[in-house]
Image (cartoon, helix red, strand yellow):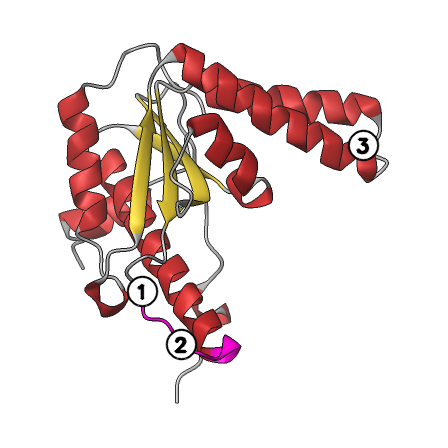
Amino acid sequence: MAQSALLETIISRRSIRRYTLEPVPRTVIETLLMAAVWSPSAHNRQPWRFCVIQSAEQKERLARAMGDQLRRDLEADGVDHAVIAADTERSYHRITSAPVLVALCLTMADMDTYPDQRRSGKEYVMAVQSTAMAGQNLLLAAHDLGLGACWMCAPLFCPQVVRAALDLPADWEPQALITVGYPAETKVKTRQPLETRVMWR
């Protein structure tokens, strides 16, 4: 059976971490963001927020702040100093070498509120899910336009650090950092057989 163009984009997308030095035009970045905001969201409240980082100075500031927190966390875990140095250097390089960074955030400002913790917690999860779907749209759009991109979960471990480094509004909660650029690598990945992940009733 022939695959549609959309399925081909979905199946051929990979997490790309190495990029050329070619800059990404602002119009292309705006196209990625437009794709992101057309994802579904709980109550159609669209809780996603995006901070686009292109300046070398801002990348440097963010990378060093996140690296400092990573180092503190690993030192508290008793990790070997050589491993810490390698991990922080890898993180620094990924952040500073990408032509574009998109800090993917959520806000609860427009979500429903409840007097009890159970429903409030579920509402928060709904905002997280909505924001993640926006991020997936962005990744797929990037691949479709010939770009590479990679989702970094690191902001979840240091949201206050990311918020301070980027001077984000207080209600913006960092969920991910998406690196974007023209790919300087190719990747081949596989998936587990579908039947190992599905139940039919």
Q: What residue lies at 54% left-to-right and 39% top-to-bottom?
A: 160
Find the magenta span and give its range: 111-118
Q: Residue 151 in the image: x percent, y percent? A: 43, 39
Pointer 3 residue: 75
- Magenta stretch: includes residue 177: no
Q: What residue lies at 24% left-to-right and 44% top-to-bottom?
A: 9
Q: What residue lies at 36% left-to-right and 52% top-to-bottom?
A: 107
Mark 3, secondary structure of its residue: helix
Q: Mark 1 packing: few (<14 Cα in 10 Å), some, or many (20+)? A: some
* Above or below, 180 relative to 44: above
Tag 1 or tag 3, which sits nearer the N-term? 3
Query: Can you tell which mark lies on residue 114?
Result: 2
* Above or below, 187 relative to 93: below
Q: In 3D space, how far apart are the residues under numbered discs 2 and 1 (Cα atoms)?
A: 10 Å
Pointer 1 residue: 111
Q: Residue 14 in the image: x percent, y percent? A: 38, 38
Q: Mark 3 packing: few (<14 Cα in 10 Å), some, or many (20+)? A: few
Q: Amino acid at mark 2?
A: Tyr
Query: In terms of image quadrants, where is residue 200?
Result: bottom left
Q: Compare residues 108 and 87 and report the one nearer the observer.
A: 108
Q: Quadrant of the C terminus?
A: bottom left
Q: In 3D space, how far apart are the residues under numbered discs 3 and 1 (Cα atoms)?
A: 38 Å
Numbered circles on residues, count: 3
Mark 2, secondary structure of its residue: loop
Query: In terms of image quadrants, where is residue 148?
Result: top left
Q: Residue 77 in the image: x percent, y percent? A: 82, 40
